[in-house]
Image: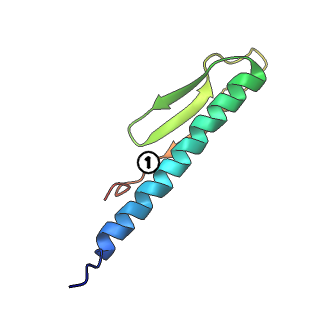
Amino acid sequence: MLAVPSMTGVAASRRLNQFLNGFNDLVRQAHERSVTERRPYLIVWRKNSVLLRPEVFAEDEESNRQRNFRLNKGTFG
């Protein structure tokens, strides 16, 4: 008897791995920015995205200095 994984399971696993890799990159970037800039960064969960931004913006800094990580429907299956 030969066991063959279902294509649905393989595709779901691939999507999950892509999501986790992207999220790990976001966390790594938050850490690097925090160390480099010597200030805390927040990872903010929203309904359909995860946002990376400084905890407090400097007076001369634009509030759009943030990175958005989209959570797509069907990411997990």
Dot 1: within a 10 Å radius of its alpha carbon, few (fewer than 14), some, or many (20 or more) residues? some
Q: Is residue 66 visible?
A: no
Q: Residue furthest front?
A: 1
* Location of residue 26 by image quarter: top right
Residue displayed at 41% across by 43% down? 48
In the picture, measured across the screen, residue 45 lies left or right of residue 53, that is left
Residue displayed at 65% across by 36% down? 29
Foreground residue among 42 and 17 = 17
Instruction: For mark 1, give the secondary structure.
Output: loop
**Residue 52 percent location from the top left of the image:** 58, 32
Residue where numbered disc 1 is placed = 71
Q: Quadrant of the C terminus?
A: bottom left
**Residue 60 percent location from the top left of the image:** 79, 19
Decide: is 45 above or below 16: above
Residue displayed at 61% across by 28% down? 53
Decide: is 18 above or below 25: below
